Image (spheres, coloured by chain):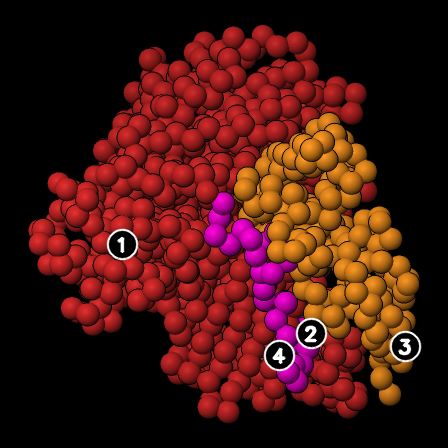
Chain colours: A orange, B red
Amino acid sequence: MSISPSKMLATLRVNGRDVTLAFSPNATLLEVLREELRLTGTKHGCELGQCGACTVILDGTPVLSCLTLAADAIDRPVETVEGLASDGSLHPVQRAFLELGAAQCGYCTPGFLNAAVHLLENNTEPSEEEIREALAGHLCRCTGYTKIVEAVSLAGRRMRASADE
Amino acid sequence: MSKNGASGTRAHVVGAALPRIDGYAKVTGAAIFADDIALPRMLFGKLLRSPHAHARITSIDYERALRLPGVVAVAVGSDLPVRYGILPSAQDETVFAIDRVRYVGEPIAGVVAEDELTAQYAATLIDVRYDILPSVMSIDEALRDLGADAEKIHPESRKANNVHKDVHLTFGDIEAGFAEAERIFDNEYFFEGNTHAALEEHSAVASFGADGKLTLWSSTQTPHYLHRVAASVLEMPASRIRIIAPPIGGGFGGKTEPVAHELAAAHFARKTGRPVKFTLSREEVFYTHRGRHPVRIHLQTGIKSDGTIAACRLQTWLDGGAYGSYGVATTYYTGALLPVTYKMGAYAFDGCRVYTNKPPCGPKRGHGTTQPRYAFESQLDAIATELGLDAGAYRAAIAVDPYTRTVNHLRVTSCGMREALNAVSERTDYSSKHGKLSSGRGIGLAASAYLCGAGLPIYWNPMPHSGAIVKVDRGGGVTVFCGTSDCGQGSQNMLAVIVAETLGVDVLDVSVCAGDTDLTPVDLGSYSSRVTFMAGNAARSAASDVRERIAAAVGAELGVPADRCIFESGRVFDREDPERSLSFVDAARAAEARFGTLAGVGSYTPPADLHGDFKGSGVGPSPAYSYSACVAEVEVDFETGEVRVERIVLAHDCGRALNPHIVEGQIEGSAYMGMGEALMEESAFRNDLHRIPNLLDYKTPTILDTPRIEAIIIETEELEGPYGAKEAGEGPLNPVIPAIANAVADAIGTRIYATPITPERVLQALDGTSGPLRLRAPIAERAV
């Protein structure tokens, strides 16, 4: 007798790569990312969808991976913090967080980064209010949010500047 | 201000707003926190926790749990009977409750299994029988005379009723002081308890090797104390235990003492021979707590006609929860730092901590000083208004002077409080706004002081508080080894900056090995804002030690006196003739050839003359104090009672800012956290239960609630600090809460004498139903 239901075999597309693995139908995307794929950059702070730390991009939309079944992610692209940097260079949002000190303990950071990247991909010139609105589901206990807002704003300016080139 | 470096030259790393050295790992998801660790054959543990606030355990039967397939082991109180506690005077906890539970959520048993779900289910199969005892859920109940029959929460306590600790201290002639006073201000306040709510839930992984050595990774701010307690509780030599503190996902004081799951992980690893991980759920983090004590405060201040403080009498009652924790220190801290900000003729302090059947309270950012600071700064605001004085100018006029002693004999060195007060007043135009804003809008000001580490260790010993080793390799790489734990405040970066500055190398050429009791010299931990000052001084001393040898070798090589060697920008050169130089790499090789393996050691012990000679004088002294001032502007909605903070300007005297970005980050985070405590955060209980043990109902400010915070760094030269630095991690929180309270008073024209300043309290105050002595009714009596 086992507490967990039998595992199913499925293919997930994570950070552009297909991975076939077995997981329980009741496993959350958070559990599968962290425990099966060992993509531990995605964090958990509550397991109840309250803190935003576990946010990943599913099918182009930020989702709380603690409230998403891994089975729901089959055949849909999943992006995690590990996929943000490309060719060894940081995403502009990552770079701005690093330069301005918007990450202190760094635990909420992956969730913020994913939400901020999603915002800037859809709105290249967000106002401060729009930045705050987009990040409102994310808790940070270290920064007071001030440098996070500044970093997202700076990253947006840089992304616009490089798009104009 | 001049930026003097290692040898009187211009500093090149200290004071530069460089990205933190651990920043890359944190923005890429590469940082490995405790729960990210997975080891082969690892088991998962869960704790069974008490559903009762106060009960006798009559029996525990765990046979069913043990028989569940996948379960590997179960443990109960008798398996780990050694009592422990962070303070030598409060050895009152066991890993699992023995005979009695004292709060809802107290661990009773542990289970380890092949997977987490099985462990969790197995815990529910453990059959515990209880005799339920009456619970004590408030300060009033704890002070009530128990009579002959009723049992105390801690029957072995020598104090009356449920009192844990009481303190009575008097400095100067308090009666004469009050007699001399022209007016006496007399108020009661209540500061509600709240919690750290660090985003990372506590986690521990233990592995027991065939060599008989235990390695325990834990999200702890105090690896050294965990080392000591693990050795004691597991009854193992400390030499066979290695504690590693990986990066911590936020601490704020919530991870500063050994708690059950860490010791349980170690026990099960030893028992099963397999690695074991325990990670707490968010609900369990609320039960583990060790958060801000609820404190009732009675404050009497006697003022002379010129506004100077003739006498001050402070009484505090702390709701300690079920165990001692740091509570004895917290009790002293509610009194010790009040005189560090303003001159006063005489001071009397009475503190009393009680046990209640709630999760144990402990230290949270500002440890015990936050609550009385809220009261004092609120009362000073009222005094300034009564006397018709500007609140900022009044505080500046009565501020302590640098290089003096306080009325309670504490040594004050550098003090930038006046500068901080001026900075926030000017930036906000406070004087022309206070009392003159439109209805519903208000502005408030407050100031405070905080420690740069405790002057005495929490367990008595004559050894250093912090030690460091700096090793230089033949490639020019530098490694600093120090027992600090980085909870996000930037201690790793601080060590790298100080060593890079001392050796004149790039900060990225310095690697930091921290928080590992096998590899690093002891640092007492990340609490009481001690790390920059103490570990920083140890690291500077270690780097100077190795630099001396390199300078001697370079001097011999270049034919110049060693004391003329300057270390800068990756080179070592003659001060008189900078062309005569060696690269740092060549200098290191020359020194290794001459002296052998290159490493320097350093340590820091605070000076002995920081305090007076009386019982209790050990809490409060610090080698230096930081000073802060804050102005908050608020808008109050008279319809809903909601307080909106529009602006927070917070100035902080951190000595020299080693890295301005990190200092600003600490100030901004303090402003935010103080705002949460002022307006919404509360550990609330109903019918013995924590009412809101989750992050949705335990309200913290979101990014939409938090204004853009204006941080102002006030630099003073702290002669004993590393490169002049003082703390920035905790002090800036303290003035924020009273600044907001004062702003609300300005906005609504009446004062609320309790935190948090909820819409409900604002509406009560506006109705005139909240007088100075009326506290909110206990939760149980309120309409739900």
The percent coordinates of residue B532 (x first, y second) are: 37, 49
> Spatial distance from mark 1 to mark 2, Cα to Cα?
55 Å
- Residue at 63%, 67% (x, y): give it: B35
Q: Are marks 1 and 4 on the same chain?
A: yes
Q: Which residue is mark 1?
A: B583
The percent coordinates of residue B320 (x first, y second) are: 54, 53
Specify the subunit that label 1 lies on: B
Q: Are marks 3 and 2 on the same chain?
A: no
Q: Are marks 4 and 3 on the same chain?
A: no
Tell me the mark number nearer the camera, choosing from 1 and 3.
1
Mark sitting earlier along the chain (1/2)? 2
Specify the subunit that label 2 lies on: B
Q: Left or right: where does residue B12 sit relative to residue B559?
A: right
Q: Which residue is mark 4?
A: B39
Q: Amino acid at mark 2?
A: Lys
> Spatial distance from mark 3 to mark 2, Cα to Cα?
26 Å
Marks 4 and 3 close (CB-CB < 8 Å): no
- Residue at 65%, 43% (x, y): give it: A92
